[in-house]
Image (tube, rainbow, N blue to C red):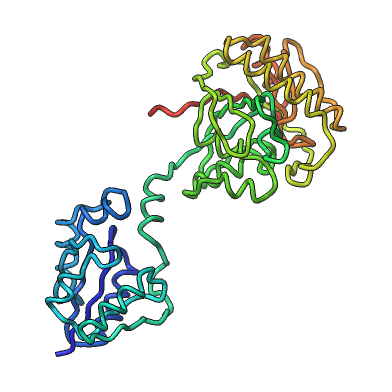
Amino acid sequence: MKKIFVSGCYDILHGGHIQFFKEARSLGDHLTVSFASDKVLWAHKKRRTSLPQDHKLALMTSLDVVDEVVIGDSHEIGLDFKDHFLKIRPDVLAVTDDDKYSKVKRKLCEQIGAEYTILPKTPPQFTPVSTSSIVRNIRTPVYAPLRVDFGGGWLDVPRYSQNGEYIVNCSVSPLVSLSNWNYEKNSGLGGSGAWALLNGQDGVESELNLGVGWQDPAIIRETGLCVWRSGNKPILDFKRNGDFLYGHMALHYTDLPHNTPSNADNSRDYDLIAQAGRTAREGVLNASLPILGEAITASYNAQLKEGMRELENEAGCLGRKYCGGGWGGYALYLFETREDRDIFVGSASCNRPIEPYITIR
C-alpha cells in the first residue's frame, strides 16, 4: 500500500482544499491529512482558528477522499505534523508549489526515505479562494458611506504632507453598495475608497499607488466626523459623531468631469489649504457650524486660486467647495439652517441632501 501524506492549516475548508486532497490521493492508496492544532495556529500565526479543531476533524474525517486525519501538535516551524509523519512513515509527502517550508520538509522526507512531491498547478475546479479571503469576505460590509472633506485636502498625499497640519472629513449617508450606487461615479466623494471596502480590501495602499492621498479609504473605514494628522499614513487625531451637522449639508452635482490623479500635481496654495485644515479642526472641536463654514470657504478659495470654476452662492450658505480634488464632480454646501438646506435641495434636481454617518459598533 502506497501511503500519501499532506499537511496544512486548513483553517476554513474550501473547494481548493478538496481538489488538492483528490490530486494527492491519486498518487497512492491511502491519504493522511494533518492539520495544525489550535495551539500551533496561535503560537505560529498569532491568531485564533476560524473553525475549532473538533469541527475541522469532523469535516475532514467525513470526506471519502481522505482515509485518515491527524492533528499536528509539534511546535517546530513548518513541521507541526512531524510526530505523526515519523510514526506513519508515509511513502510520499505531497505539497503545493508555493509551500513556504520546502527545505525543512525535504530534510524530514530524507530522514525516512519518503518522496517529496510537488503537485503541479492544474486548472482549478472551483473559483480560487483562500482562508484569508473567506474571512475578509465575512467581515466585509454590504453598505458603505462616501465622504466629504472640509479642510486640509491634499495634505494626505505623502509628498504634500505637512507636519503638524490636519485633514478634516466626514463620512456621509445615503450609503452605497455594490448593487446600489445612488451617486454619480468618479465625482469626488471617495468612491474608490468605498469600492475597496465593499470588496474586502483596505484601500489605503491602492490609493497611494495612484499617487493620491489616503483620506478616502481612511474615513470610509473609520466613519464619523474625523480629524486626521497630515502624514504618510492615516493617524486619527480625534473623531466625533457629527450630530451638529444633521440637516445642514447638501451636494450639488456640477456635471463636470472629475479626476483626482490627473490634478494631483497642480500648483496650489498649500499654506491656505493648511489654514483651512486647522480652522476645520477648530470647528469640529467646538461643534461650530460658522467656524466649519470658514474652513470650507478657505478651502474653496484655494480651489479658485488653482483655477476651478466659481460655484453659485446660495441663501443661508456658510461655505461651499468642490469635494475631493475638485475640478468637477460634486460640490459641498454647508447651510446655517435646515430650512435653507431644504430650499436649496428642492431648487434643482442636481442638488441632494446628505447627513453625517457613523457606524454603531
Q: Is residue 327 left or right of residue 167?
A: right
Residue 348 in the image, given as x and y percentages of width and height: 73, 25
Q: Is residue 270 left or right of residue 130?
A: right
Residue at 47% in and 49% down: 200
Say which quarter of the image contains residue 288.
top right
Residue at 20% in and 58% down: 37
Residue at 65% in and 25% down: 164
Q: Is residue 98 above or below residue 164?
A: below
Residue 228 in the image, given as x and y percentages of width and height: 59, 28
Q: Is residue 205 above or below residue 100?
A: above
The one nearer the camera, 41 or 86, is 86
Residue at 76% in and 11% down: 315
- The image quadrant where one finds the C terminus is top left
Q: Is residue 157 left or right of residue 29?
A: right
Q: Is residue 229 left or right of residue 275?
A: left
Q: Is residue 173 above or below residue 243?
A: below
Residue 344 in the image, given as x and y percentages of width and height: 70, 18
- The image quadrant where one finds the N terminus is bottom left
Q: Is residue 125 above or below residue 191?
A: below
